[in-house]
Amino acid sequence: MRRALPLLLPFALIACSPTPSPPDGAATPDGQAATAELPDAAPADHTATLGAYHWRLVDARSGAGARIEGLLAEGGAPLQLDFRDGGVQVRNACNNMSANVALDDDRMTVDQVISTMMACQDPRLQTLEREIGQRLPGTHHITIAEGETPRLTLQTDSGDVLTFEGTPTPATRYGSEGEQVFLEIAPERVACSHPLIPDHRCLQAREVRYDANGVRVPGDAPWAPLYQEIEGFTHEDGTRNVVRVRRFDVADPPTDAPAQAYVLDMVVESETVTR
């Protein structure tokens, strides 16, 4: 992370004997009160705040104030930025996009964007990807207004102003980074006993493991009903999935509620199973 160096101001040297300074608050010869010297403000470090939230685009304006329609077209999830491990990921576009980021006080430098090459048939997503890909690289000015719903404002080097609202990440909500696990989700739900939902049908899941080379390790855990949903995952009957999730311990869960939460990271495998 780049940090700004403090600016050193030269002091004028006076050859004659120095005149004693008046006490704090005392009048100077011209009748004005002495002004106390204030220390320079410490450079802002936005790293923790940026990483604590998902940043979803809510407004985009050109330097002249015109709405940037290509970034704000309705009909799908808004553009989202996630900051982590010295980089930024762009979500809800056509491809997965990422870049390295360096912070220097209120300036953010974004390197060249790297993107997957998946074909995209949705014109809205094509436009969204093109518009953010043109604006994200470069050195920009940022401000963060913290509060119940924090706001990130990014002014690009070309003068465009992008405004994002923050929603807490799972790590922020649950107070930890959680544990990464892989779950295989069976193609059909199973009947299970739920204290609050009659005739509930749970996902059927088992934990699986992979070695360092990405090869599945023999010895899967037994199948068992999962009494909670996986946040961010939509199950379709007849489809078997292997998903990578973060598993979080829930502090003080409500009565009869699970003591753990699962949040989708990515779908590793997906297969339609013939009934």
Image (tube, helix red, strand yellow):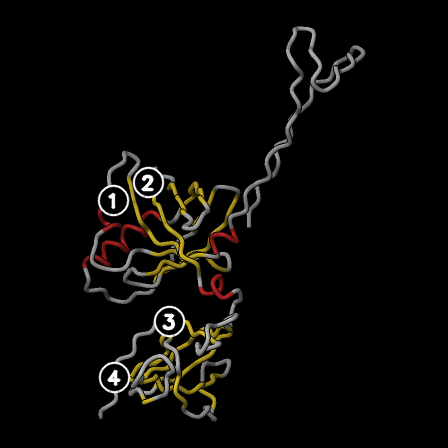
Q: Earlier in the sequence, mark 3 or mark 4?
A: 3
Question: Mark 3 or mark 1, which is nearer to you?
Answer: 3
Classify mark 2: residues with Cα within 10 Å, few (<14), some (14-19) or many (20+).
some
Q: Which residue is mark 3?
A: 231
Classify mark 3: residues with Cα within 10 Å, few (<14), some (14-19) or many (20+).
some
Q: Which residue is mark 2?
A: 160
Residue in front for this viewpoint, 51 or 150:
150
Q: CA distance from mark 1 to mark 4?
A: 40 Å
Q: Please provide percent x and percent y for residue 1.
A: 55, 50
Tell me the kind of residue under disc 4: Asp
Q: Is residue 91 above or below residue 155?
A: below
Q: Which residue is mark 4?
A: 237
* SS category of the residue bearing label 3: strand
Question: Mark 3 or mark 2, which is nearer to you?
Answer: 3
Q: Are marks 2 and 4 in contact (CB under 8 Å)?
A: no
Tell me the kind of residue under disc 1: Ile
Q: Please provide percent x and percent y for residue 156.
A: 37, 42
Q: Earlier in the sequence, mark 2 or mark 4?
A: 2
Q: Earlier in the sequence, mark 3 or mark 1?
A: 1
Residue in front for this viewpoint, 72 or 24:
24
Q: Please provide percent x and percent y for residue 22.
A: 74, 15
Q: Are marks 3 and 2 in contact (CB under 8 Å)?
A: no
Q: CA distance from mark 1 to mark 2?
A: 9 Å
Tell me the kind of residue under disc 2: Asp
